[in-house]
Image (cartoon, rainbow, N blue to C red):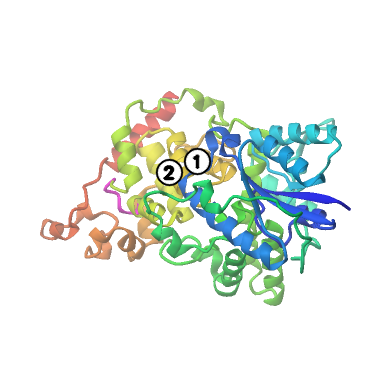
Amino acid sequence: MSTTILWLRRDLRLTDNPALEAARHCRRLVPVYIHDPALSGRWAPGAASNWWLHRSLTALDRDLRQLGSRLVLRAGSTGEVLRELIRECNATRICWNRRYEPGLVLADRELKLGLQATGVEVQCSNASLLFEPWEIARKPRADATAPYKVFTAYWRACLERGLPGMEAHPRPAKLPALPGGVASLRPTDLGLLPRVRWDAGLQQHWQPGETGALARLNAFLENNALDYAGARERPAIAGTSGLSPHLHFGEIGPRQVVHAAQWRAHNLAGNGGPQIEAFIREIGWREFAHHLLFHFPDSDREPLNHRFRGFPWRKKYADDLNAWQRGRTGIPLVDAGMRQLWHSGWMHNRVRMIAASFLTKNLLIPWQEGAAWFWDTLVDADLANNSLGWQWVAGCGADAAPYFRIFNPVLQGEKFDPEGRYVRRWVPELSAVPARYIHKPWSAPPSMQGIRADYPPPMIDLGRSRERALAAYRQG
């Protein structure tokens, strides 16, 4: 066979990569990543995602070189760059793994048809999901199918179909060489790293790349999986897998995660079954998010529940939004989460829900503002997950929390961070506050008010703001 191009995108790994498996049986192989943020439109990757991408591309190039190849980096309009590379390398085939964001689905379809019209063979695969978004559908009538809008029913249908096993796509021992003279940019040429180096916290917390992904999965299954259902709710401990950014960038695939988790459960002789099932269910939520965005392509910016299109959000809220973003709301658990996000590019899921509820319901700021901030600051910023999460909390999405369910950050903190360890770590101004007051320092007796350092008072009364939210819900 002649030259094949392997177009890499959100599949930055060598194991369980079906496009790589399809492409590698050739005489010459060109693994290429094309930097084209304009293709993503309004959802071009944010600053934290770009930081991760830089390091993930660097790690992938290192891994490819160990197999006798290397990563070719190009920048520009994707279609033009690919056609130029095809001519340059005399390529007759191109392989890629599908992406499912609405704009990219259409762009991929047009690109595929255009390339095939010129005689180039195109092969597309699924590397990022357990099921293609169109594979799981309900049957409201005998002659029709429809997408699911309720997670429980969706996940039940997935389990009835059977979770896919690990496919025979092992890490290759060697790859075909590149054609001679193929030029490449360097990762630094893509301008992904911040000019003002705010990323020290990210470097401390993360190891982007396939090696880091596999290490994190193995450590979680070995040390935390047996207490997952309970530990995952406690933000002060490492009770979650931390795999979300690795999954987003495709440094590990969901089939690998599920297979490893099931193998772990099997070797525990049934003792860890319920905990492992709870963990795999979270992979199901990720599937559900992509299912929804694929079938409802406006849900990244429009509420799935059309009733909320006229919801009376506040119009002027810039100062309050800024205080929330900076972690200066005067509500300790919210501020701890927002500061964790800024420092590490990640926030504990329980705290994400609490911070999002505070923004949308206590402050009546549109959920799209929160989604945009998370998009720029999360290393695991994923359009499907981000949209589902924010709409769920705001009460306007599929399978959403009812709007009248308003998280009380004080009660949530007392339940899930009873000793205040999480708050003390991220809000050091409160480090001397006793546990009984840590989540409501304003209630401490006057003699203790001085130990709050320069921490601000609450920007809003939680009780009154809750009543205002419920009144807005009734009005909307």
Query: In the rendered view, would you say 472 is above or below 463?
Result: above
Dot 1: within a 10 Å radius of its alpha carbon, few (fewer than 14), some, or many (20 or more) residues? many
Q: Mainly helix, strand or loop, the magenta region?
A: loop
Q: Is residue 362 magenta?
A: no
What's drawn in magenta, residue-wise? 329-333
Q: Amino acid at mark 1?
A: Trp
Q: Is 116 on the left or on the right of 97, as rendered?
A: right
Quadrant location, the C terminus: top left
Residue pictured at 61% horizontal, 67% vertical: 211
Q: Amino acid at mark 2?
A: Ala
Can you tell which quarter of the image residue 217 is in? bottom right
Does residue 128 appear in this view?
no
Q: Position of residue 164 (x, y in %)?
A: 77, 57
Q: Position of residue 11 (x, y in %)?
A: 67, 53
Can you tell which quarter of the image residue 20 is in? bottom right
Q: Position of residue 337 (x, y in %)?
A: 38, 53
Upstream in sequence: badge 2 or badge 1: 2
Residue pictured at 74% horizontal, 45% vertical: 132
Is label 2 in a helix, a strand or a loop? helix
Q: Which residue is the site of mark 1? A: 390
Q: Is 87 on the left or on the right of 305, as rendered?
A: right
Residue pictured at 65% horizontal, 45% vertical: 288
Q: Which residue is the site of mark 2? A: 356
The residues tagged by marks 2 and 1 sit, at their Cα atoms, a distance apart of 7 Å
Q: For residue 428, which numbered disc appears in the image?
A: none
Contact? badges 2 and 1 (CB < 8 Å): yes
Residue sitting at the far front:
181
Residue sitting at the far right:
1
